[in-house]
Amino acid sequence: MVRVPGRDHAGRRNGPGGSLVWFAGVIEVVGGTLILLGLFTRPVAFILSGEMAFAYFIGHAGNGFWPVLNQGAPAIFYCFTFLYFSAAGPGPWSLDALLARRRGTVPVL
């Protein structure tokens, strides 16, 4: 069977527009791209951290207490990783730092 983007292995749509899965996908694609570029790192990482916490509690926490047993370990890992990025900042090679150098201000790293 040929894999078609936006469809699962049975040929069904993965998430109709405006659904919770669709919004999560948009947040992850846009936020992941911005984190990769180092642009608006702190607020984007905070939003992504909240989205991963929301995903854990909606999708995994109801299946048991322990994250390893309820398959929620990756969601918790990404939640705390993005929370760290929101506190630590973008770093010296990010677009945020480049824009701050061009403006002549000291980047908050």
Image (cartoon, rainbow, N blue to C red):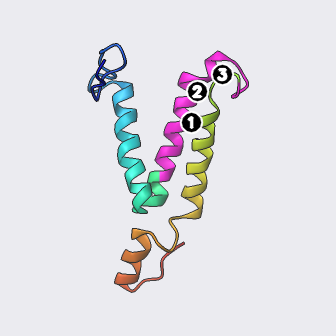
Q: CA distance from mark 2 to mark 1?
A: 6 Å
Label 3 crowd (10 A; few <14 / some 14-19 / many >=20)? some
* Residue positioned 39% across, 69% down in the render: 95
Q: Is residue 45 left or right of residue 6?
A: right
Which type of secondary structure does the marked residue at label 1 adopt?
Answer: helix
Name the residue at the front extreme.
1
Res 103 quadrant in image: bottom left
Residues at badges 1 and 3 in contact (C-beta under 8 Å)? no
Against 74, residue 107 (above or below) is below
Res 84 quadrant in image: bottom right
Against 108, residue 49 (above or below) is above
Against 101, residue 77 (above or below) is above
* Residue positioned 65% across, 33% down in the render: 73
* Residue positioned 47% across, 72% down in the render: 93
Residue flagged by tag 1: what amino acid is it?
Ala
Magenta run includes residue 52:
yes
Q: CA distance from mark 2 to mark 3?
A: 11 Å
Label 1 crowd (10 A; few <14 / some 14-19 / many >=20)? some
Label 2 crowd (10 A; few <14 / some 14-19 / many >=20)? some
What segment carries the magenta color? 45-68
Q: Nearer the viewer, mark 1 or mark 3?
A: 3
In the rendered structure, find residue 57 and report the number of the disc placed on it: 2
Magenta run includes residue 108:
no
- The location of residue 2, given as percent across then percent down, is 28, 22
In the rendered structure, find residue 21 and report the number of the disc placed on it: none
Q: Nearer the viewer, residue 52 or 7?
A: 7
**Main SS class of the magenta portion in the image:** helix
Find disc 1 in the rendering and name its residue.
53
Which type of secondary structure does the marked residue at label 2 adopt?
Answer: helix
Residue flagged by tag 3: what amino acid is it?
Asn
Name the residue at the right extreme.
66
Q: Earlier in the sequence, mark 2 or mark 3?
A: 2
